[in-house]
Amino acid sequence: MRLRYIITPLLLLMLFMGQGRAMAQTKQLTTDSITICQLLSEGSRQPVGTCLPLFYARKFLGRSYVAHTLEGNDPEQLVVNTRQLDCTTLVENVVALTYCTQQRLLTYRAFKHALIDMRYRGGILKGYTSRLHYFTDWIVENSRSGLVTEIQQPQTVFSAIQQVSVNYMSTHPQSYEALKKHPEFVSRIRETEQNLSGMQFRYIPKSAVGNSKLLRQAVNDGDIIAITCNKPGLDIAHLGFAVWKNDGLHLLNASQLHHKVVDEPMTLYRYLQKHPSQTGIRIIRINNKQ
C-alpha cells in the first residue's frame, strides 16, 4: 500500500522553522570562518616583533559579551564563535590565532584543530567531561603541550601561593545544563577536581599589581592574566590580556560589566580593589613557536 503524506499548515511551519534554523547556523558558521581567515591573513602580514596576542585581542574589541556560548550541545561538539565572547573564549580564540600565525597554518581547518588541541584534554574531543572546564586545568594541560608557560618568577613579585581547591561544578551540578541532563558526568568531573586540588602556584597578590619596574619586567604585553579568587570551590575568577600603559597595567577582556570586549580604562590595580573576592593574578605566556 502506498503511503500518502498530507502536508498541513502546521507541518509546513515546522519544516520552514527547521530550515530557518539550519540556514541561520550555516550563516553563522560562514561568518565565523570568513572572520578567522581574514584575521589570519592580516596577522600573517604583520612585521616581525608584533605582539600577536594583543594584535588579535584588539580585533575583537567591541564584540558582544555573551556567557556560556560553549554550552547547549548534546553531544559535545566544537564551538567556534567570533561574534559573542566570554573571557575564556576570547582567550582561546586569540591563542589559537596566534599559534596558527606562528606556524603559518593560515586556514580555518587549522584554527579549529588548534582550538580542539587547547580546549580538550590531550587534544581529543571526547564528550563534555573531556573539556578543560577549570582554567588551572587549562594551564597545566597547555603547559605540558608546550603551547604556554606559566610565569612564577621572580619570587619578589610572585610572592603569594595559591593552593588550588576546586569542587564547584560537582557541588553545583544544577548550574550546568550538561550535568543536569547527564548526572553520570558528575563523578568524572569530581575526579578531575580531585586531581587539581592541592596543586600550588605562585601568583602576584593584588596589593603588588602596581606600576613598578619589577612588575613591568615580570609581565609582558599580551600575557594572559588569570585573576585568582577565594570563592569556595573555584580557582580563577576572570581572564584577559595584559596591556601596559603609562599609568600601569590594564586588562583587555570580555567584560560582563561593559557587555563587550574592552580595553579596561581603569588600571588592573583599581579593578582588583573593587572585587573583594579577587586575590591577585597568575601570568601565562603564549610560547613563541616561530
Image (cartoon, rainbow, N blue to C red):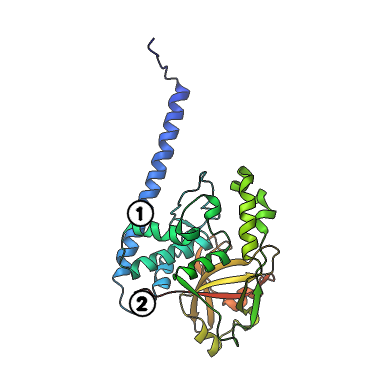
Label 1: few (<14), some (14–19) or many (≥20) C-alpha neighbours in 10 Å: many
Picture residue at 61% right of the left edge, 53% below the top: 188
Picture residue at 31% right of the left edge, 78% below the top: 48
Q: Is residue 258 left or right of residue 61?
A: right
Label 2: few (<14), some (14–19) or many (≥20) C-alpha neighbours in 10 Å: few
For residue 54, the mark is none
- Residues 81 and 155: in front is 155
Picture residue at 41% right of the left edge, 43% below the top: 24
Picture residue at 40% right of the left edge, 48% below the top: 28
Q: CA distance from mark 1 to mark 2?
A: 24 Å
**Which residue carries the number 1 mark?**
33
Q: Is residue 5 left or right of residue 138?
A: left
Which quarter of the rendered picture does the C terminus lie within? bottom left
- Residues 77 and 239: in front is 77
Q: Position of residue 147 (x, y in %)?
A: 44, 70
Q: Is residue 104 left or right of residue 151?
A: left
- Residues 185 and 23: in front is 185
- Residues 174 and 14: in front is 174
Nearer the N terminus, badge 1 or badge 2? 1
Which quarter of the rendered picture does the N terminus lie within? top left
Give the structural element (helix, strand or loop) at label 2.
loop
Give the structural element (helix, strand or loop) at label 1.
helix
Q: Position of residue 73 (x, y in %)?
A: 51, 46
Q: Position of residue 193 (x, y in %)?
A: 63, 60
Q: Position of residue 134 (x, y in %)?
A: 58, 62
**Which residue carries the number 2 mark?**
50
Q: Is residue 207 left or right of residue 79?
A: right
Q: Amino acid at mark 2?
A: Thr
